[in-house]
Image: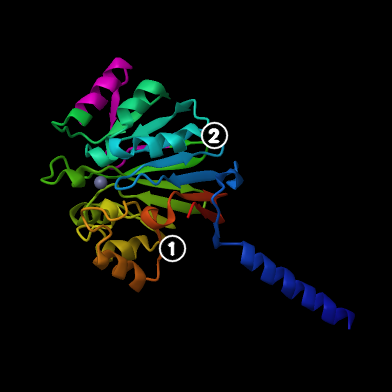
Amino acid sequence: MKRFFVVLSIILVLLLSSCSNGIGNTSNSPNFSNVSQRGLVVSFIDVGQGDAILIKTPNGKFVLVDSGSQKEREKFFKFMEKQNIESFDAVIATHPHEDHIGNLDEIISNYKVLNIYMPKVTSNTATFRNLIQAIKSKNLKIKNAYKGVKFDLDGVKFEFLAPNSKKYEDLNNYSAVIKITYFDRSFILMGDAEKLSEGEIQKNNGDLRADVIKIGHHGSSSSSSKFFIRVVSPKYAVISCGKYNDYGHPHKETIKLLNDFKINILRTDINGTIIFNTDGKNIKILTDK
Ligand SMILES: [Zn+2]
């Protein structure tokens, strides 16, 4: 009888640990204060039609990838102001489109920024000129974002997977694509990279598997080719897009593909801001809707 209880308790312990281990701890909560301050925190900020991703390292260093459009300025800064940020170790402008760099000039002007990474491409828009002006007035030197550039912060590895070429017809393909790895867990942020860039990434990189992918170009069918999603083989796909946007993003082809692969989809237009927190092994997700 005693032996029976020993066996039973071992089974129970095993069952409990298999529940808390691994990925899939999802909870809905409007309260972000219960995001653990430990580990890596990756926040996909709801900025309507656009991208803005804030990364916080285990020791409280910040990296910002894009900033949404100026139209969504209030939403973006409301979130940022709650984070007690004094400086950014890195700011990454994935590519010069307004829905990505819209508020970056203000970030550069108002915060201490140690490094800024951008792909080597210019744009003749007021938004882009304002960003360059802000960078110049802070005496910052732009670091080129391209395949192979890496940096490390508190054991969190940041690696650029793209761009892989010097010239593209489509501005979207200049997108800086970033892989972030913290122990066993990883994220790939695609910017607006399209299928052409996905092909180059696959040709030039080894292990592309990641737990979380920020889907390219707001879920457009011009990104997310079947082969690329298969090699990344994510558990979670995040789509950053606005409700009833003019482009019909995310396209139904993309949603079908992700569903076919049984990938969990999280969308800023449906879930609001989406926050991933990982200790390098387990992943917790918080959404505000
Ligand atoms: Zn975009």
For marks 2 and 1, give the CA distance: 26 Å
Question: Does mark 1's beta carbon lie closer than 8 Å to ligand 1?
Answer: no
Residue 207 seen by the camera: no
Q: Is residue 112 left or right of residue 105?
A: right
Residue drawn at x 20%, y 57% is 195
The mark found on residue 110 in the picture is: none
What's under tag 2, amino acid-wise?
Gly
Q: Nearer the viewer, residue 230 or 250?
A: 250
In this figure, what is the number of numbered marks?
2
Magenta stretch encompasses residue 150: yes
Residue range corresponding to the magenta coloring = 128-151
Q: Nearer the viewer, residue 259 or 248?
A: 248
Question: Does mark 2's beta carbon lie closer than 8 Å to ligand 1?
Answer: no
Label 1 environment density (alpha carbons within 10 Å; few <14, some 14–19, many ≥20): some
Residue drawn at x 78%, y 77% is 8
Label 2 environment density (alpha carbons within 10 Å; few <14, some 14–19, many ≥20): some
Q: Tell me which corner region of the image, top left, top right, bottom left or bottom right, holds residue 78.
A: top left
Q: Is residue 266 left or right of residue 33?
A: left
Residue drawn at x 30%, y 27% is 105
User: According to the image, label 2 marks what residue?
Assistant: 60
Q: Which element type, helix, strand or loop, lies under badge 1?
A: loop
Q: State the image coordinates of residue 261 (x, y, percent, origin top left).
A: 36, 71
The mark found on residue 235 in the picture is: 1
Q: State the image coordinates of residue 165 (x, y, percent, origin top left).
A: 18, 43
Residue 142 seen by the camera: yes
- Tag 2 near tag 1, CB within 8 Å: no
Q: Tell me which corner region of the image, top left, top right, bottom left or bottom right, holds residue 18.
A: bottom right
